[in-house]
Image (tube, rainbow, N blue to C red):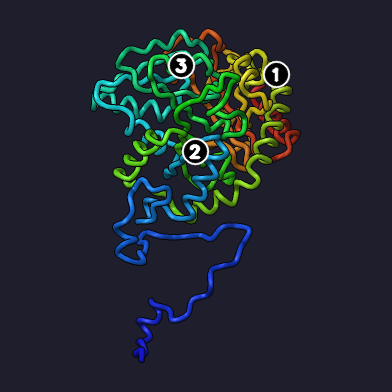
């Protein structure tokens, strides 16, 4: 006869438990640090390289593995690791791949925090950081020390689409790992693991799930996707050593948003093109930057690779030199629907001011002189966004 348990014990070890066999639209949410093992055999007859190693919350739960599997499928990969932010995912790759004395190549338009992290590794551990021009594959000249090249398609802020085919071919010929920041394409604009008739593939994609997969401007998360199991295990080991983990609640929120990610991406992409057509007619700008624009650097590469015609919801403009910093700050402050903020992919449109002279190492003859404003298109109607920009431009005329 089982002894009657005290109330305090019953509150922890509930005597009744509802059966868990229903099917719902959204998968169940698992919140876990400790995971209970059914027996010592379940505890010891397992290995961290198992496909679904349920051993501790940092190693994964059904919630995190479900999202990881879906992200891998969207991007055309096989294996996926989740990280607390896009930058955390980038740092995971750098930490797992690079050793003292190694050479890493980065595009001149690289995501700024990635370059800052690599410069820190260079100062502390002797990593050698080299800069190349993303639209000129000849500028990528790896030595025998080269281990990694970072690619961005399209590039940060100035939105050049790189010569992805020739850069990847050259990296493969010299045994240099290729890592693509795939946040702009989101796995929707093109397949980074099969992007040509020669079935070219990058080795790693990093994706800031903060952007399009989240879609709400309220969750930070990143992913690292690969196809090669050995490379995945190398990344996974560093993932475990560094204690990288994500919240089950945040994971479930992004999983919920995946169902309409492509719809949002398409709408924001179309709205960006509508703004692009209007922005090109405005006399205030010396240059309008967008991969689908024939005059934008790398347009031919975008046309060849992004056969879907998709191009995300980002447009940048360079103001004519007669507009100084004070004028452009006034323009940004006069925007109403566009809010000043970093990131993109959320429902609210954003604007951000940049001084390219402080951001680039190489001479960029394809860019006009002047200050740049990047517009990140949200879900508002494009006609309202055009009116907002027009009203702000009137303030500086």
Query: Distance of mark 3 from mark 2, alpha carbons?
Result: 40 Å
- Crowd tier of the residue under label 2, counting other residues whose Cα lies within 10 Å: few below 14, some 14–19, many 20 or above: some
Secondary element at tag 1: loop
Out of 130 and 172, give the one closest to the viewer.
172
The x and y percentages for residue 395 are 66, 27
Image vertical order of residue 87 relative to residue 134, above or below: below
Return the residue at label 3: 357
User: Which circle, 3 or 2, is nearer the viewer?
Assistant: 2
Out of 306 and 326, give the one closest to the viewer.
306
Quadrant for the C terminus in the image: top right
210 sits left or right of 197 in the view: left
Marked residue nearer the N-terminal end (3 or 1): 1
Residue at the (70%, 26%) spot, across then down = 273
Out of 33 and 3, give the one closest to the viewer.
3
Residue farthest toward the bottom in the current orientation of the protein: 1
Secondary element at tag 2: loop
The x and y percentages for residue 49 are 36, 45
Marked residue nearer the N-terminal end (1 or 2): 2
User: Which circle, 1 or 2, is nearer the viewer?
Assistant: 2
- Crowd tier of the residue under label 1, counting other residues whose Cα lies within 10 Å: few below 14, some 14–19, many 20 or above: some
Residue at the (52%, 7%) spot, across then down = 365
Secondary element at tag 3: helix
Residue 54 picture quarter: bottom left
Image vertical order of residue 380 relative to residue 48, above or below: above
Quadrant for the N terminus in the image: bottom left
Residue 336 seen by the camera: no
The x and y percentages for residue 315 are 62, 26
The x and y percentages for residue 204 are 45, 30
Return the residue at label 1: 280
Return the residue at label 2: 78
Residue 234 seen by the camera: yes
């Amino acid at each position: 006869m089982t002894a009657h348990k005290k109330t305090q014990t019953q509150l922890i070890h509930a005597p009744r438990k509802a059966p868990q066999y229903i099917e719902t639209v959204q998968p169940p949410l698992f919140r876990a640090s400790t995971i209970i093992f059914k027996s010592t055999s379940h505890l010891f007859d397992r290995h961290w390289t198992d496909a679904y190693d349920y051993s501790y919350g940092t190693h994964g739960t059904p919630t995190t593995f479900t999202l990881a599997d879906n992200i891998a499928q969207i991007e055309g990969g096989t294996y996926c690791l989740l990280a607390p932010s896009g930058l955390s995912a980038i740092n995971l790759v750098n930490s797992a791949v690079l050793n003292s004395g190694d050479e890493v190549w980065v595009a001149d338009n690289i995501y700024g925090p990635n370059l800052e992290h690599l410069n820190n590794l260079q100062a502390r551990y002797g990593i050698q950081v080299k800069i190349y021009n993303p639209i000129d594959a000849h500028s990528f000249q790896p030595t025998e020390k080269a281990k990694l090249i970072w690619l961005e398609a399209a590039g940060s802020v100035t939105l050049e689409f790189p010569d992805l085919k020739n850069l990847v071919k050259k990296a493969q010929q010299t045994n240099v790992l290729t890592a693509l920041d795939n946040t702009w394409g989101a796995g929707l604009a093109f397949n980074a693991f099969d992007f040509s008739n020669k079935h070219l593939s990058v080795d790693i994609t990093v994706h800031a799930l903060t952007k399009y997969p989240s879609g709400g401007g309220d969750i930070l998360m990143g992913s690292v996707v690969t196809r090669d199991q050995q490379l995945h295990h190398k990344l996974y080991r560093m993932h475990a050593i560094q204690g990288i983990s994500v919240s089950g609640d945040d994971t479930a929120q992004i999983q919920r948003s995946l169902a309409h990610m492509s719809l949002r991406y398409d709408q924001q992409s179309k709205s960006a093109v509508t703004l692009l057509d209007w922005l090109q007619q405005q006399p205030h700008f010396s240059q309008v930057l967008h991969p689908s624009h024939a005059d934008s650097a790398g347009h031919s590469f975008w046309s060849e690779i992004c056969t879907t015609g998709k191009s995300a919801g980002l447009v940048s403009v360079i103001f004519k030199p007669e507009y100084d910093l004070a004028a452009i700050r006034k323009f940004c402050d006069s925007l109403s629907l566009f809010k000043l903020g970093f990131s993109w992919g959320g429902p609210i449109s954003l604007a951000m001011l940049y001084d390219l002279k402080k951001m680039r190492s190489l001479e960029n003859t394809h860019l006009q002189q002047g200050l740049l404003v990047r517009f990140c298109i949200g879900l508002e109607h494009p006609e309202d966004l055009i009116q907002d920009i027009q009203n702000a431009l009137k303030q500086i005329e």
